[in-house]
Amino acid sequence: MVKILFVCLGNICRSPMAEFVMKKRVAEAGLASGFEIASAATSDEERGNPVYPAAREELAAHGVSCAGKTARPLLPEDYARWDLLIGMEERNLRSMRRICGGDPEGKMARLLDYTSAPGDIDDPWFTGRFSEVYGQIEAGCAALLERIVKEKEMGGKWE
Ligand code: 4NP
C-alpha cells in the first residue's frame, strides 16, 4: 500500500486538484487497491470548505470529480500515517516541516520535483491560472506514479 498526502496552503485549490487527478490516474491504471490518497492544508483558513469553484470547474473540464472533499489541516500525526507528503511549493514544505517537527524519514517533496522541470506550483487562488496549474499537476502526478510503479517493480520499498 502506498499512502500519499498532497499538501498546499488552503486545501481548496492545488492539493485537492492533485488528490483527485492522482486518484483518477491510479484507478485508470488498475492500481486503486494499492493506494490511499488524500490532501490537507498548512493553514486553518479554509477548514471545512469545499473545493474552490474555479478549481472544481477545471477538474470537471477534464472529467475529474472532487465531490465531497472539504478542506482539513495537516496535523503532526499525519507524518507517521502517510508514506509521502507532497507539497506544491517550497513555502508549503517549510510549513509542513514546522507542523510535523521536521522530515526525519525523507517523506516530503514538491510535486514537480518528480518531473524533469522541478519547481513550485504557484497558488492559483492568487494568480487565477487554474488551467496552467492543472497542466503542472497532471505532469507531476504522471511522474510521481511512474516513479512509484518503477519502485514497486524493483521490489522492497512498497511491499
Ligand atoms: P491552495 O490555494 O493553497 O492552492 O488551496 C489557497 C486557497 C486559500 C487561501 C490560500 C491559498 N487562503 O488564504 O484562504
Image: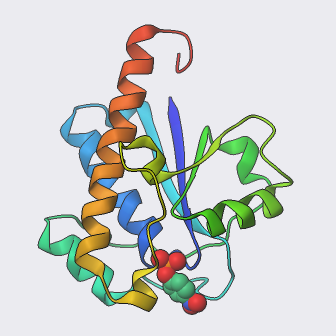
Instruction: Indicate the position of residue 48 as horizontal and vertical percent values.
Output: 56, 83
Q: Is residue 136 above or below residue 26?
A: below
Instruction: Indicate the position of residue 132 as horizontal and vertical percent values.
Output: 26, 72
Q: How many marks?
A: 0
Which residue is found at the position 46% from the left and 52% from the top?
111
Q: Is residue 159 above or below residue 49?
A: above
Residue reaching furthest top?
A: 155
Q: Is residue 142 left or right of residue 42?
A: left
Which residue is found at the position 32% from the left and 70% from the top?
133
Q: Is residue 153 left or right of residue 4?
A: left
Q: Is residue 146 left or right of residue 106?
A: left
Asked if one can make out residue 9 in the rendered structure from this viewpoint, the answer is yes
Asked whether 103 or 119 is in front, the reply is 119
Instruction: Indicate the position of residue 29 as horizontal and vertical percent values.
Output: 21, 34
Instruction: Indicate the position of residue 62 as horizontal and vertical percent values.
Output: 14, 66
Q: Is residue 14 above or below residue 140?
A: below
Asked whether 148 or 120 is in front, the reply is 120
Asked if one can make out residue 70 in the rendered structure from this viewpoint, the answer is no
Which residue is found at the position 56% from the left and 18% from the top?
157
Which residue is found at the position 69% from the left and 43% from the top?
81
Q: Is residue 93 left or right of residue 105?
A: left
Q: Is residue 52 above or below residue 59?
A: below
Q: How is the image coloured?
A: rainbow
